[in-house]
Amino acid sequence: CLVFLVTPRVSGQVVKMKSYEFGEGLDFETEDGKEFEITGYIQPYFESKQYTDADSLDAENRFRMRRARIRFNGTSSNKRFSYRLQIDLSGSSEGDDSSGNLFLWDAYISYDLSSRINVTFGQRSTYTDNRELFINSYALQLVERSRLTSAFASIREFGLFLQGNFRTGGGSYLKPYLVVTNGDGANVFNKDHGGLKVGGRVDFLPFGLFTNFGQFREADVMREQAPKLVVGVNYSYNNGMSSRRGRGSGDIIYLNDNDEESLPDYMKYGADFLFKYRGFSALGEFVKTSATVPSDITQRVRNDGTTSTNFEVNEEQGQNVENYVKGRMMLGQGFNLQAGYLFKNGISVDGRYTHLDADDNSFLNNGTFYSRPNYYTLGLSKYLDRSYGTKIQGSFTYIDGDNINSSAGDPIDGNEWVARIMLTLTF
């Protein structure tokens, strides 16, 4: 760790660069105890996709800047107030079927009501997603998050977040969370659709806290000397949702006979765990969703703003409002299991299995983006220092298809495989 002193004056105060540790960011401190931190990372990325029984199709290759993020954290003199601002300069979205660029990721203010209870207001990751969304993007065990996250996570939301941290005897901890948000995902600057989303989570750490925030980083870089485990359950109810899973606002709108909005409700619950010990780490997650469709829906709003009374699902089901609405939502269940071992030389070998089970009427049956029940992934990573700061990662994923389409929407016979390579550089 390097330590520097600088002497610029901000509002009459001397600002000191307190420390810099590669991969952990720059830390500054003022004379009266205010703290300020700057961190960031870039992730150049390559992906190649091919289909097992489609020799006539060339491999679909993709080069892009997967992420280019910079984050600012700060605290007040008494440390009770804190804030975060995080932006993504790549503009990449977090889902293959989502649209639009999300430059603003985090923008919130937190206050410690006591030493055990914290309240946050603003936009941030939500506690009602699966555990992988607790993990920073630069600290993932494999190149990409699992397809469970893509299918069901809302990723970022705006609202009120409460977090508790209580010792429960024998070195164990209980962490309850309560969330009240707009339920429309990130960067909602226009009309708010539907009602509020309410949810919560309870985490239990029977063996105490992880080392160096290891609860929020997948691989066991710190090589925990004693077993560390966190298990949790989560639940949320979105009252009136205007998107597939609560990741957008106004994407899918329905009306009643009075031309008033009438939107489906969306429920999600799950359970998960993270375990680490001496370089070994394991993550398990389960998520299930369901929806309730209002009986007064008579119209749907097209992408161009016009309306239609056509709710035909298919030839067998014909005109069916409830099944049509559910067919545009992420409904079903799934689980993700992954594990890996990080050797002392910085090489990590990892594996993952993800399974998605779609409801009969669900967007998970969409052949272009989903309709793929099983994902098998092997990964190899090389950590270039004893932190998450710099690493090279590669992975190979074999995917079982079920009446799938290519990225261009053409029907494909067979299955799919995807190879990925990514470099992470954090400062």
Image (cartoon, rainbow, N blue to C red):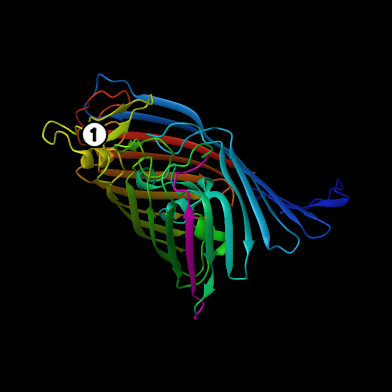
Residue 251 picture location, percent across and down: 39, 35
Q: Residue furthest bottom?
A: 169
Q: Using the rendered image of the protein, determine whether residue 207 is visible from the camera's viewpoint.
A: yes
Q: Residue furthest right?
A: 12
Q: Is residue 406 above or below residue 427?
A: above
Q: Using the rendered image of the protein, determine whether residue 426 is visible from the camera's viewpoint.
A: no
Q: Where, quadrant-wise, is the N terminus in this rendering?
A: bottom right
For the residue pair 237 and 58, the one nearer the viewer reads as 237
Q: Residue at x 53, y 62 (%)?
A: 162
Q: Residues within 10 Å of mark 1 (few under 14, many from 20)?
A: some
Residue 155 picture location, percent across and down: 46, 46
Q: Is residue 230 above or below residue 189?
A: below
Q: Where, quadrant-wise, is the C terminus in this rendering?
A: top right
Residue 71 picture location, percent across and down: 63, 45
Q: Is residue 135 left or right of residue 121?
A: left
Indicate the secondary structure of the residue bearing disc 1. loop
For the residue pair 258 and 362, the one nearer the viewer reads as 258
According to the picture, the residue beneath numbered tag 1 turns out to be 415
For the residue pair 196 and 420, the one nearer the viewer reads as 196
Residue kind at label 1, given as amino acid type? Asn
Magenta-drawn stretch contains 177 = yes
Residue 200 picture location, percent across and down: 43, 61
Q: Is residue 371 left or right of residue 135?
A: left
- The magenta-colored residue range is 169-187
